[in-house]
Amino acid sequence: MFFDKLHFKFLQMPLFNKEAHQLETHFDKWLYFLKHLDSFDHIPAILNEPIFQKTFQIAELANLSREQYQAYEQNLLDYWGVKAAVDTAREEGRVEGRVEGGAAVLLRQLKRRFGPLPDWVAPRLAAASPAQLEQWADRLLEAESLAAVFADT
């Protein structure tokens, strides 16, 4: 079944003789690209658009030898592995930073509510999980004493 927006254009590439400065439409640019692809050392200024940049990248990959392509794939795998490790470390650092920040805020609130705190409070807050910190922060609002904040934990 044919689609009303589907059109076919037949052309003879040897008859396409426009130079780079004569290209006016994207169709002209594609024809120029296809005709001269094998002779390009770099992307001509007239074709320096995202779609042609991507096409040049694909053409460069297609032109690699089998060994070069395998090395390229291995480098990609190595890159993705390192990137995943960095992303994971970054996220873990963010989580750790939020926990440390929560502990610091809770410590400040405890000092304001109950005055000078015993030496065991700061290390206990530093070792607490996010859920424990949240529980203690909720208790702080209604607790009558420091012991009540940390009760049953």
Image (cartoon, rainbow, N blue to C red):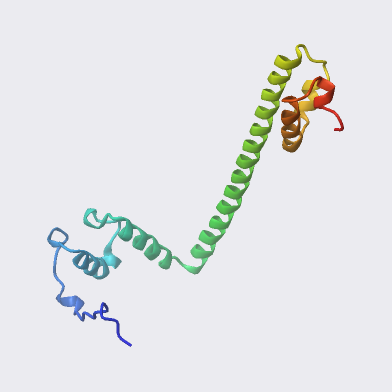
Write the residue at 14% across / 66% down: 18
Of 150 and 3, nearer the camera is 150
- Snapshot quadrant of residue 19: bottom left
- Relative placement, left or right, of 82 versus 46 is right
Measured as percent of width and height from the top left, residue 88 is found at: 63, 45
The residue at the far right in this view is: 152
- Snapshot quadrant of residue 117: top right
Measured as percent of width and height from the top left, residue 21 is found at: 14, 58
Write the residue at 16% across / 73% down: 16
Measured as percent of width and height from the top left, residue 150 is found at: 82, 27
- Relative placement, left or right, of 135 versus 32 is right
Quarter of the image with the N terminus is bottom left
Measured as percent of width and height from the top left, residue 6 is found at: 27, 79
Q: How many marks?
A: 0
Write the residue at 25% across / 58% down: 47
Of 37 and 135, nearer the camera is 135
The residue at the far top in this view is: 116
Task: Identify whether 81 is placed above or below 91.
Answer: below
- Snapshot quadrant of residue 14: bottom left
